[in-house]
Image: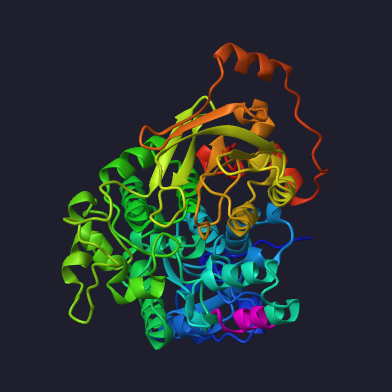
Amino acid sequence: MSKKVPPNLLPKIRHLLGRMTRVPRFLYKACGFTDEELDRPIIAVANSWQESGPGHVHLRDIADAVKAGVRMAGGTPVEFNVIGPCSAFGSDFRYDLPQRDTIADSIEIQIKGGLTCEGLVCICTCDKSVPGMWMGAARLNLPTIFITGGSALPGKVRGETICFPPDSEVLYENLNKLARDEITPEEFNEFFIDLEDHWLVGCGACPMLSTAETTQILSEALGLALPYSSMALGAEKLRFAKKSGMQIMELVKEKLKFSKIVKEKSIENAIRVLNALGGGTNGVVHLLALAYTLKLSAIDLSVFDQLSRETPYLCNIEPNGPYSTVDFENAGGVPLLMRELKNLLHLDVLTVTGKTLGDNLNDFSFKNIQLNRDIIASIQKPFAPSGAIAVLHGNLAPRGAITRISFKRRSSSESFEGPAKCFNSSEDALVGVFVGKVNSGDALIVRYQGPRAAAMSEILAVVIAINIVGLENIIIISDGRFSGASYGLVYIGHVAPEAYVGGPLAIVQDDDLVKIDIKKRTLNVDLPQETIEARLNAWKPPKMRKKKGVLAIWAQIAEQADKGAVLKTFM
C-alpha cells in the first residue's frame, strides 16, 4: 500500500527531482566531477581529435587550452569526440561526404541524448569535421564558438616549397625523368620518400585552399570564430583556444545562440569571402547544407551567382596562385580580407565576440600585419573584377553546376567546345585517361558520382591523372565533387540533377559536342531538346554496386547538390 507524500514536503521533493533531471550529477560524480564543478555552467567541447591525419593529431592540446579557458571563466568543460577521418587515407571516396552528416548527427545525439549543457565549443580542422559541426551546432541552437586547427607549415623538397604533393612541380619533373629512363625506379623511390618525409612541417590542414582551409576561413567569416583565430599557428593558436573557452561563457551569459549569429546575412558574407578568397568549390555545397539545416531557403545557387559577379577576386593562394595559407595569415588573413570587402558586407551581423562584424573590423589592430598586396589585393586593384565561384546553367545542368575560376591553370579560356568522352565511374575515367581514350580538347564526363549514386564522391584522382599524362585544353564535368586541392584544369562539378536520378548528364554520348561559356555561365550539349527528351525517355539507370550501411541511406534520401547534398532531416 503506497503512502502519500505529505503536502509540506512536495516543494522539497520537486527541487530534488528537478536537480536530478537538470544534471545527472550521480553519473558525473562517478566520472570524478565535484559538486563545485557541477554547480557551474556545463560547456560541451566537441573535438575531432584522432591520430590518423595531420589536421587532427594536435587537437588534444587545443582542447586542453579551451577547457582551461572555460574553467578560468567559471564554467565546467566536458569533452567528447567525433569522427573525422582524412579521406586521403581511404580507398573509397564514397564515404567522404557522409562523414559530414554523421558528425552533425553525433553532436546532436551526444548533447540531446546524453550531455546536458549550456554552451558548445567546436574544435575541428578538416574537410567534413568543420561543416559537420556547423550543421550539428545549428540543430542544437546553443551558444556556440569554433576554434579550428589551422594550417600546417608547408615543407620544402629539393628546393621547392610544397603545399600539396600532387601539385608539386618536382614530382612531375621526376615522373617525366622516370618515364624517359633518365632516372632508375630506385632513384625515383628515393625521391618519393624524400617527398613523403618533408612535404609538411608540423600539424594542421594542407596549407592551401583545400576544403579544410576554405571551411576554417568561412567559420571566421560566418562570425563563429574569434577574429584572426582560424589560421593562427602554434602558441598563438593555444592563446586563441583559451580565449575561445573564456568567450563561450560570455555567450552563455548573454544567451547569444547559434541562430542569432548565423543568419541569411552571415551566410551571404561568407559567400562573398569564399569568392574573394578563391576557396574550394566544396565551400558552396557546405554553405548550402548549413542554410538547409537552418531552413534559410533564400540561400540558393542564384545568390552564389549574384554575389560572385559583384565580389572582386582578391587572393593569390594555392592552388590558384603561388602563396600558402600561412602566407595569407601573415599578410592579414580573414580580418584584412573582410576589411577590403567592408563596403560589400552586412556589417550589422552579430559575431561570437558579442559585437557586430563592423565593430570587430573597426577594433582589430593591423599594426603587426605585414601587408603584401601580391597575396591579398586591395579592392581598388583586385586580381579580377568578379569572384572565383561561377554557377553554370544549361541543358546539362538545369538546376546548376559549379566551377572555380583559377589563375593557375593550363586552359585560361572562358569558353570551350569539344567532343564528350563519357565514363560512368571515376575508376573507368582513370583507366580511360591512362590508356589514351581521352585526348586534349575533350570534354571528359565522369557521371554517376552524385549524392544518390555515390554519396557525391570526389574525383581528385582523375584531375591528377590528367596532369600526369599532360593533356591540354580539357574540361572535366561531373555530378560529383572536386577537392579544393584540384588544380591546373577547368573542372565543373555539382551538376544537378545528377545522372542517377535522370539528370541530362546521363544521356550524353561519346562525341556529342559540349559547349561551355564561363563568362555567360552556360553548360550545354549541342543537341536539340527533342533529342535530349527522347534519350531521357529511353534511358535506364545502369546497374550500380550494391550498397549497404550508410551508402544505402544516401542512395535513398540524399538531396541534390543544389540543396547541399544533405540527408533529408525534416519531416
Q: Is residue 45 above or below residue 256?
A: below
Work out whether residue 276 or residue 68 is closer to the camera in this orientation and state it. 276
- Could you tell whether 64 is left or right of 99 in the image? left
x, y percent for residue 367: 17, 80
* Quadrant housing the N terminus: bottom right
Of 19 and 425, the residue lying toward us: 425
Position of residue 325 measured from the top left corner of the image (x, y, whole percent)? 40, 70
Which span of residues is magenta-colored?
190-199
Q: Indicate the position of residue 150 as horizontal and vertical percent values.
A: 45, 74
Residue 354: image quadrant is: bottom left
- Please give left or right for residue 312 compared with residue 448 in the image: left
**Residue 83 seen in this snapshot:** no
Which residue is nearer to you in this view: 543 or 242?
A: 543
Look at the image and say whether residue 532 sits in the magenta stretch: no
Judge left or right: residue 388 versus residue 292: left
Is 257 on the left-hand or right-hand side of 555?
left
Task: Tell me how many marks there are.
Answer: 0
Residue shown at 27%/72% (left/top)?
A: 332
The scheme the figure's colours follow is: rainbow
Is there any visible trace of residue 61 in the rendered image? Answer: yes
Q: Residue at x 64, y 28 (%)?
A: 508
Q: Position of residue 141 (x, y in %)?
A: 45, 56
Q: Which residue is painted at 21% across and 60% down in the image? A: 340
Q: Is residue 117 above or below residue 387?
A: below
Location of the C terminus (image quadrant): top right
- Residue 196 belongs to magenta span: yes
Q: Going by the picture, which residue comes out furthest to the top?
A: 530
* Magenta highlight: main SS: helix
Near-viewer residue (79 or 427): 427
